[in-house]
Image: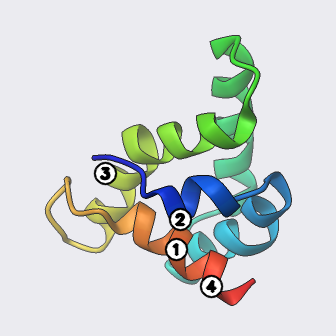
Amino acid sequence: MSIPFEIKSVLTHAMIGLDVYPQFRRIGFDTIKLHKEFETDFKASGKKDEVAYFLDYGIRVLNPRVNQRLNRPLDHPTFLKMVEYGIREY
């Protein structure tokens, strides 16, 4: 699953916390727990670009979890749609 240019070019660290994580809360996820899990994974990765890593992590880890909760096929691009929605709302 590739990340659309529109998302890569405008997503910021602030948007992740203010606009993307609330989308997960709307469908019943504990966003504090999600954030801690992401931070742990990011630090262990040794990567420098947190926003790019968040998008990768979202596709690899969060997308299947969200789709499972919503009873969708695991490869449905729900995570990217949630990010797009959060960006539009910003």
Q: Mark 4 points at which residue?
A: 88
Q: What residue type is labelled 4?
A: Arg
Q: Give above or below for 31 relative to 59.
A: below
**What is the crowding at mark 2: few (fewer than 14 residues within 10 Å), some, or many (at least 20)?**
few
User: Which residue is most to the right?
Assistant: 14
Which numbered disc, 3 or 4, marks the residue closer to the eye? 4
3 and 1 marks in contact (CB < 8 Å): no
Q: Name the residue under label 3.
A: 64
Which numbered disc, 2 or 3, marks the residue closer to the eye? 2
Answer with left or right where residue 18 lies relative to residue 84. right
Q: What residue type is labelled 2?
A: Glu
**What is the crowding at mark 1: few (fewer than 14 residues within 10 Å), some, or many (at least 20)?**
some
Nearer the N terminus, badge 3 or badge 1?
Answer: 3
The spot of residue 65 in percent (x, y) is 37, 54
Which numbered disc, 2 or 1, marks the residue closer to the eye? 2
Q: In front here: 11 or 23?
A: 11
Estimate the spatial distance between the alpha carbons at disc 2 and disc 1, rounded to whole Å. Answer: 8 Å
Q: Residue 84 carries which label?
A: 1
Nearer the N terminus, badge 2 or badge 1?
Answer: 2
Q: Give above or below for 42 relative to 70.
A: above
Nearer the N terminus, badge 2 or badge 3?
Answer: 2
Residue positioned 19% across, 53% down in the render: 75
4 and 1 marks in contact (CB < 8 Å): yes
Nearer the N terminus, badge 3 or badge 4?
Answer: 3
Q: Name the residue under label 2.
A: 6
